[in-house]
Image (cartoon, rainbow, N blue to C red):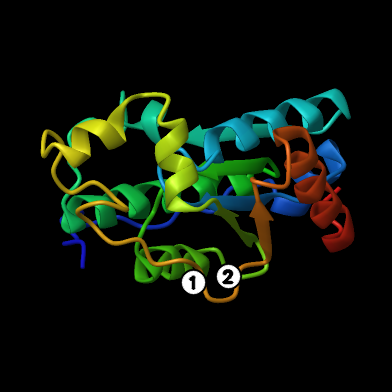
Amino acid sequence: MTEVKATNIVWHEGHVARKQREDLLEQKGALIWLTGLPSSGKSTIAFTTEHALIERGRMAYVLDGDNIRHGLNKNLGFSAEDRAENIRRIGEVGKLFTDAGIITLSSFVSPYRTDRDSVRELMENKNFIEVFINTPLDVCEERDPKGLYKKARTGEIPNFTGISDPYEPPENPELVIHTVDSSPQEAALQIISLLETRGNI
């Protein structure tokens, strides 16, 4: 559990309610959490969905695992403890974005169910949409655009999900996307259809 070091602080209520922001944007904020093995297609699908939503006049933003580690989380490694903190921080950022009425796409391997479930609890469930990018390990390894699987197989990269570290797939995700059968564009349409069904857009 994250140690609380901040003391003598009080929550300051603003003068603008979430509904006012959502009414302004004509949408309801949500955190769409894309999880799956490395090279499963999470980032490609997230950015494709973001682009499609923007083209439809919707406010959307991607929080991408690698991109976030260039800044906010650059002090974290890939141990189980650091992964948990990585996800905790993104959960908090996602909560802020969702409160702002933004449709937020979070693209993180996030291999442990307990970490993803903690974000769901933080988001009060209805604002959290878990999307399992279900791509078989052999397909991910064949794609390997960054050459990470090859390095993991030779021991150059420790704690690599799917090789030396486990991946725990979601048990009850809101959506499962099989990338072997779906293009990024088709996957984006599945996500957008779910958002329409849920009344976010």
How crowded pointer 2 is (Cα within 10 Å; few <14, some 14-19, many 20+) is rated as few
Where residue 8 appears, as percent x and y from the top left, is: 23, 57
Q: Local crowd at mark 1 within 10 Å, few (<14), some, or many (≥20)?
A: few
From the image, which quarter does the N terminus lie in?
Answer: bottom left
Residue 130 is situated, as x and y percent measured from the top left of the image, at 59, 60
Mark 2 and 1 residues: CB-CB less than 8 Å, in contact?
Answer: yes
Classify residue 72 as left or right of residue 40.
Answer: left
Left-right relation of 199 to 164? right
Q: Residue at x 29, y 31 (%)?
A: 148
* Residue matched to label 2: 124
Residue at 79% x, 49% y: name it: 190
Quick check: can you spot residue 168? yes
Where is residue 76? Give x, y as percent.
19, 40
- Up/down of 73 relative to 34, above or below: above
User: Percent from the top left, x then y, of residue 88?
Assistant: 35, 55
Instruction: Using the rendered view, name the quadrant where residue 131 is placed.
Output: bottom right
- Can you name the residue that lies furthest to the bottom here? 171
Front-most of 139 and 120? 139
Amino acid under label 2? Glu
Q: Secondary structure at mark 1?
A: helix
Which residue sits at x=86%, y=51%? 193
Q: Is residue 191 left or right of residue 78?
A: right
Image disc number at residue 121: 1
